[in-house]
Image (spheres, helix red, strand yellow):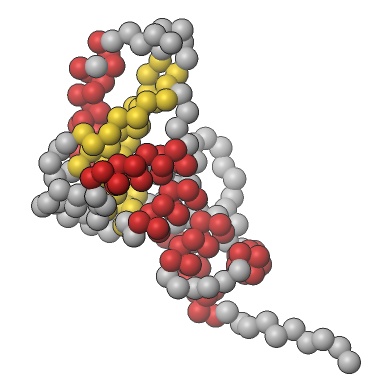
Amino acid sequence: MRYQALRTDDVALRERMKAIAHERRRFGYRRLHVLLRREGHLVNHKRLFRIYREEQLTVRRRGGRKRAMGTRAPMLIPMLPNDRWSLDFVSDQLTDGRRFRVLTVVDDCTRECLALVADTSLSGLRVARELEALIAGRGRPRMIVSDNGTEFTSNAILGFADRQRIDWHYIAPGKPIQNAFIESFNGRLRDELLNETLFHR
């Protein structure tokens, strides 16, 4: 008597995983697991990792800045408040030379600045926490637009978008014009505040 494995072929799962991995080429198996679970594929992460390796989808290490490939869906003009929010970071330094960053959040319809969060370290988990607090007071946006920075492509952000049922749109790498509302706001923020103010520790 010998045990015979009852492993299924997972054809549909394999094909969908390859399709998502082709669309978002810098996403590893953990991020793919979040996206597949969002679509209704209930699969154990260890089983998913085995299929991930068999299909040779492992993300290659590369030097320089890490970027995820964004979705290429055309963006519509927002007509109502909370239709679409834009997110980005602005960097500056204190008088003692320490760097800090500012998370900026803008409503693309009203052009209103919804939040400015400044700190020396802003992780994806912190960004998700700040957005949850903002949503509690203002309501949930239909879409959020950002670049492909590691803070915005982390598991914390993917989980947040999944829980809140928000469509998160990533602009194409190296194309900040696709996030023009927040870029325009950040330019004014830098000219009118950051470049005119000395920040002490």
The quadrant in which residue 147 appears is top left
- Figure disc tally: 0
Quick one: quadrant of the N terminus? bottom right
Asked if 21 appears above or below 81 in the picture, the reply is below
Asked if 97 appears above or below 161 in the picture, the reply is above
Q: Is residue 55 left or right of residue 163?
A: right
Task: Please identify the residue farthest to the bottom as the structure is shown.
Answer: 1
The quadrant in which residue 48 appears is bottom right
Q: Residue at x 50, y 79 (%)?
A: 12
Q: Residue at x 82, y 86 (%)?
A: 3
Task: Please identify the residue farthest to the right as the structure is shown.
Answer: 1
Q: Position of residue 87 (x, y in %)?
A: 30, 40
Quick one: quadrant of the C terminus? top left
Whether residue 78 is visible here, answered yes or no, is yes
Whether residue 149 is visible here, answered yes or no, is no
Q: Position of residue 32 (x, y in %)?
A: 51, 61
Q: Position of residue 176 (x, y in %)?
A: 29, 38
Q: Position of residue 67 (x, y in %)?
A: 45, 44
Q: Residue at x 59, y 45 (%)?
A: 61
Task: Please identify the residue farthest to the front as the structure is shown.
Answer: 137
Q: Is residue 4 left or right of residue 109?
A: right
